[in-house]
Image (cartoon, helix red, strand yellow):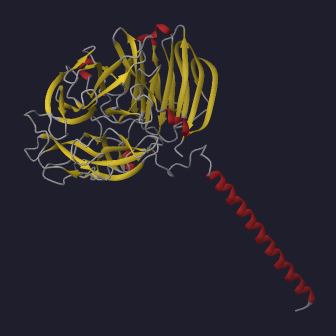
Amino acid sequence: MNKTKLTLLICSLILAILTGLLIYQDNKSTNIKQQNLKSKPPYSLPPIGKRNEYRPEYHFSVPDKWKNDPQRPIFFGGKYHYYYLYNKDYPNGNGTEWRQATSKDLLHWTDKGIAIPKYTNKNGDPWSGSAVIDRENTAGFGNGAIVAIVTQPSANGGKQEQFLWYSTDNGKTFTSYSDVPVMANPGTKDFRDPKIIWDSRHHKWVMVLAEGGKIGFYESHNLKNWHYISSFLTENIGTLECPDLYLMQANNGTIKWVLGVSANGKAIGQPNTYAYWTGSFNGLEFSPDQFEPKWLDYGFDWYGGVTFEDAKAIDPLKRRYALAWMNKWDYANNIPTMKEGFNGIDSIVREIELKSTGINEYVLTSKPIETINALVYSKDYIKQLKVTGTKTLAITGDVYQLDTDISWSDLKNAGIRLRESADKRRHVDVGIFIEQHYSYVNRAYTGQPDKSHQYLESQAPFDVSKKNVHLKILVDRSSIEVFVDDGRVVHSNLIFPKTTDQGITLFSVGGKAVFKDLVIKHLKVQ
């Protein structure tokens, strides 16, 4: 090999080495940038098909298969322990069992698996009930044992009867106390969903039970032997389920008992959600302030609701938490999330307060749990927009909280179109129909589960004389929850929009609407 060729060869080798080093450094730099991007919240959606279309971002959802009724969460060991009805065989088999999840903030959940399994004996599968911490060892299973009273369709002809299960391993697993019910069926078709509280004023356990159109009250000193004490009768709100009983202190200092129940007010033009009454309870009987119930939600999808104490509150009577199953039995098996392997989500956990509205008249108000603000990764703000007709915002999104004040002087209808398609044909409408005096959420123009088209627009009475409203709207991938003014009215509805439908349009009909302090907080669970 001559000197010239050797020189050229050496130069080529050096050039190749340098090129390789440059490519390596460039790739290394690119990888670092990608890692940095991954460490930040995603400000744009990943390509379609790379994520679940309907799995909620910040609402609790079952890991797989099916869930329905929530069981009231209990707090111990620095965590909320949440049990819910789960069917591992859905849609090819029946029967529910109690599955558990834990959380410190009621937003981030850790699955703990099955706590009360189904079909362990001839008494069938466990349905709804409630768990309590037996701090004084009244049942004899030890101080701090967790005792659950659960409805099961017993071996006695499938009658709805109440059975006791207990846990001595901090609620991880439960043992059946007996194949014999602690509350036998007295001869009624509906006899279910026991809710138990410790009545410290009378030093005893009190149970409320759903019995068709009435709520039965029972007492016990050991959680094993129960005695009937009274009943509360209802009218025109269907078969009752999942009763609730608790104390609250109103904003005027008055302490009231609240009796709640999942009910169907369709016959009287009322919701199919959570009805409640305020009143007094003397340890034996509940006396309501008014006979007609009030409603904690006016949407289609807030059922089996439970309330529970804020364990960290200085005064737990001033505020409680609440959550419910977001579904409706009319279409519960027509939920498109099943293509992603699950059917069942819950509402956001709410903070509820009791407020005085007149002489001996009280209402519950709701707002999203305050810790939701920890999920905000970006925010958009518009000081004011005057809208006559429509105004499409440059802001888009599919997971967020939107707040705004709307005012008007002469108007027929005003609101916001959410999860709107680019061609404007698909959207969810939230607004105030001033002409007809109601607030509403209309899901007729987007994906929704009701094939009968009976449940397309939820409505609630609205006093239009004040000519303004504040809307707080929570949007997730398959749900919308609207809190009107101070949250005395809430609409909770399932929606199933296309992934690409992310537009937001303000609208007014019959005049000008002024939108002030419009804030959109984009949310993501970290």
Residue that appears at 78% across and 67% down: 22
Decide which of 30, 144 is in the foreground and name it: 144
Residue that appears at 51% across and 10% down: 467
Residue that appears at 45% across and 35% down: 312
Residue 32 visible here: yes
496 versus 9 height, above or below: above
Q: In the shown orientation, is residue 219 left or right of residue 415?
A: left
Q: In the shown orientation, is residue 55 left or right of residue 45?
A: left
Q: In the shown orientation, is residue 244 left or right of residue 164?
A: right
Q: Position of residue 140 (x, y in %)?
A: 21, 46
Q: Position of residue 221 (x, y in %)?
A: 19, 36
Decide which of 411, 227 is in the foreground and name it: 227
Q: How many marks?
A: 0
Q: In the shown orientation, is residue 341 left or right of residue 244?
A: right
The image quarter containing residue 266 is top left
Q: Position of residue 483 (x, y in %)?
A: 45, 25
183 versus 213 height, above or below: below
- Tell which residue pokes out farthest to the right in this image: 3
- Tell which residue pokes out farthest to the bottom in this image: 1
Residue 394 visible here: no
Give the position of the N terminus as an image quadrant: bottom right
391 versus 83 height, above or below: above
